[in-house]
Image (spheres, helix red, strand yellow):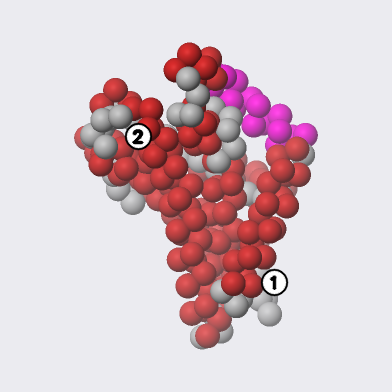
Amino acid sequence: MIPDFSLGQKIILWVIPLLFAITVHETAHGWVASKFGDSTAKLLGRLTLNPLKHIDPIGTLIVPAILFSLGGFVFGWAKPVPITWQNLKNPRRDMALVAAAGPLANFVMALLWVGIAKIAMRVNSAPFIYMAQIGISINLVLMLLNLIPIPPLDGSRIMASFLSPSMAYQFNKLEVYGFLILVLLLASGILARILGPLLQGLLSVFFRFFGM
């Protein structure tokens, strides 16, 4: 049984999973883009796991801290990795693959945290068990959140690749309202009602499949 950590201890144990989840997500976008011909992120020094290169003060620090203090599910974001879509070999296809790289990276990281959790349980390390559980949860939250087809989330880039150029153009114009839409969905509780059951289902599958 995991002991009741103090608020300060919980914050410390949250920091590493959160920073890695956001940092690897953004780095994955840039890395895949570089493989398809766009070296913008590489030239700007964003193909790195150094979180200082990716931290957004609001999305990486303030928003997660507020959500954590409110007791809801926690998510955040980093500075978006710049992608010059004109440099991609096949822009419509490649942008979808670049977008999918972020959520896929979070899924892979959730699996890695499962491995850490199992090791921590063997040595009975309560802090690492808690940290690993947070790592699994926050990576699955970010994966699910980013797959929502609301610009500028990754799901919208994937969806746009299946639309005609004219429809994709009109759809992407919603990006100026994207953050407002997300805030309204969060404040109204709709986002939690959408992601909550999906997250609980995924966590249940993870824990049962990996014997946790």
Quadrant of the rendered image containing residue 44 = top left
Q: Mark 1 points at which residue?
A: 4
Disc 1 packing (10 Å; few <14; some 14–19; many ≥20): few
Name the foreground residue: 195 vs 46.
195
Q: Mark 2 points at which residue?
A: 94
Magenta segment includes 181: yes
Mark 1 to mark 2 CA distance (whole Å): 46 Å
| Marks 1 and 2, the one that precedes in the sequence | 1
The location of residue 33, given as percent across then percent down, is: 31, 37
Name the foreground residue: 206 vs 11.
206
Q: Are marks 1 and 2 in contact (CB under 8 Å)?
A: no
Q: What residue type is labelled 2?
A: Asp
The structure residue drawn at horizontal position 50% and vertical position 24%, both measured from the top left corner, is 163
* Element under disc 2: helix
Check the image and report above or below for 163 versus 69: above
Say left or right for 88 vs 133: left
Quadrant of the rendered image containing residue 188 = top right
The structure residue drawn at horizontal position 65% and vertical position 27%, both measured from the top left corner, is 181
| Quadrant of the drawing holding the N terminus | bottom right
Check the image and report above or below for 164 versus 132: above
* Magenta region, main secondary structure: helix
Q: Which amino acid does label 1 sit on?
A: Asp
The location of residue 65, given as percent across then percent down, is: 61, 47
* Element under disc 1: loop
The location of residue 118, given as percent across then percent down, is: 52, 78
